[in-house]
Every structure is written in structure tokens, then in C-alpha cells.
């Protein structure tokens, strides 16, 4: 087991991390961590030190915490069309043969998923209705296959922001798998008003993507 992150923590932080012994507890920690509107990436160590995270930061922290309890550190990225919205990164895990996810988001509906999904597509599609921009447009269009962060161990991604930047670059370069056709996208209805309001409860408005299209 990789103990690099623990080696850089205070005693109190190590106890906190030790307590994150289920995916749900990892999600609870991220939900209690304020959303960062900054573009710069934080490695898992800085997430704990600063108690701030955006979606990539949170997913990387979740991957490190999941790794500590025996899961591989896997990230999956979900994308809109360019200019519509932010992408969104999940830390995914498998229990009893089913997939779930831990995630940090400014939107309530884009966070945890129970491990009940039989495929990556099924897991990703569970985010479809909640994946919308501030104009009320449903924006999820593509996703990537999982990226195993063990590839970046030589960059000390758990404790180095340089490693976090390399992970982001790799995610953005991965092949994107379409979820819907252009005709389906054209026919989508706007987000329901109550769903829209619920999704933005407690959002940090400085961190919301401003659509260009």
C-alpha cells in the first residue's frame, strides 16, 4: 500500500484520513470541504491542508483515499461540448461487482453515486439530468474510460501539484465516448425549474462556469 500521503500529514490529519474508511465517508469529507473557484489544481495533500477543492482536486483526493482502503485510484472525466460548461471528474470504485463514484461538485446532483451501476455508461448516464449549466441547458455529451493514477506515482501526484497538473492534462487528452447524438442534443428540453434551484443549493457562484455558447 502506498503511504506517501500519510507521510506528509500531521497526526490529526492522519487520524482524519484513517477515519475515511468507506467511499461514503470520503464523500462526506469532500461535501464538508468548501468548493474552490480557482483554476489552479490542488493535490490531495493540499486539499487537506487548505480544506478547499474543485472537482479535479476532489476526485484526486477521493482516488487517494480510496486507494488507501484497497481500491485502485481511478478517475473518469465527463465532458460537455466546448464552451457550454465545465467538465466533471469522478473517482470511481467497484463493490460487489457494481460501480459507484465519489465526486466534488458545485452542483448538488453531481456528487456521490452508490455502487449499483453495471457499466461505465450506466454510471455516467446517472449524471445526465443533473449535468446542466447556469442557463439551464443539459450539457453532458461524452465521457472517458477510467484513468489509473498509478501511472503518475513517479510524479508524486498525492503530494505534488505538478502531479495534479499532469493528471489534468492526461484526462483532457483521452478519447471521448459519445453519449447522445446531435439530434438528441438538439431536442433536449430545458432543466426543470425546481431541479435547477435544487442543484444550485449552497453553490459557490464564483466557481460556476460562464457559458460562451
Image (cartoon, grey):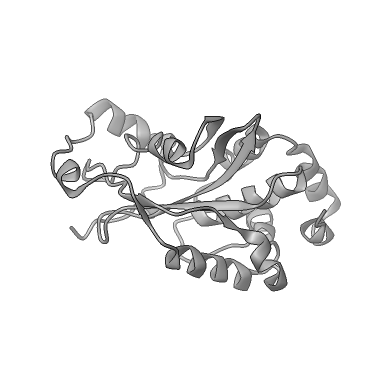
- In the picture, the quarter occupied by the C terminus is bottom left
Residue 196, image x, y percentages? 28, 33
| Visible residue check, residue 52 | no
The answer, for residue 56, to whether it is visible in the render is yes
Q: Within the image, what quadrant is residue 82 found in? A: bottom left
| Identity of the residue drawn at 18% across and 36% down | 190
Q: Nearer the viewer, residue 138 or 151?
A: 151
Counting from the top left corner in percent of width and height, residue 111 is at 49, 38
- Is residue 152 placed above or below 130 in the rendered structure? below
Is 99 above or below relative to 169? above
Residue visible at 55% across and 39% down? Answer: 101
Return the x and y of residue 66 as percentages of the image width and height: 69, 45
Name the quadrant containing residue 162: bottom right
* Near-viewer residue (142 or 194): 142
191 to the left or right of 14: left
Classify 164 as above or below 6. below
Residue 38's place in the image compared with 122, above or below, is below
Amino acid at each position: 500500500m502506498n503511504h506517501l500521503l500519510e507521510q506528509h500529514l500531521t497526526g490529526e490529519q492522519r487520524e482524519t484520513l484513517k477515519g475515511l474508511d468507506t467511499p461514503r465517508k470520503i464523500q462526506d469529507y469532500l461535501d464538508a470541504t468548501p468548493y474552490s473557484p480557482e483554476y489552479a489544481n490542488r493535490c490531495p495533500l493540499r486539499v487537506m491542508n487548505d480544506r478547499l477543492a474543485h472537482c479535479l482536486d476532489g476526485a484526486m483526493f477521493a482516488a487517494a483515499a480510496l486507494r488507501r482502503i484497497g481500491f485502485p485510484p481511478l478517475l473518469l472525466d465527463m465532458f460537455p461540448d466546448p464552451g457550454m460548461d465545465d467538465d466533471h471528474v469522478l473517482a470511481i470504485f467497484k463493490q460487489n461487482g457494481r460501480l459507484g463514484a465519489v465526486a466534488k461538485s458545485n452542483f448538488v446532483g453531481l456528487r456521490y453515486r452508490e455502487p449499483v451501476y453495471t457499466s461505465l455508461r450506466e454510471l455516467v448516464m446517472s449524471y445526465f439530468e443533473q449535468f446542466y449549466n447556469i442557463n439551464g441547458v443539459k450539457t453532458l455529451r461524452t465521457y472517458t474510460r477510467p484513468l489509473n493514477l498509478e501511472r503518475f506515482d513517479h510524479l508524486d501526484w498525492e503530494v505534488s501539484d505538478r502531479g495534479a497538473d499532469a493528471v489534468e492534462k492526461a484526462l483532457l487528452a483521452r478519447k471521448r465516448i459519445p453519449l447522445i447524438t446531435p439530434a438528441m442534443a438538439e431536442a433536449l428540453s430545458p432543466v426543470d425549474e425546481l431541479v435547477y434551484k435544487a442543484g444550485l443549493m449552497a453553490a459557490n457562484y464564483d466557481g460556476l462556469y460562464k457559458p460562451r455558447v
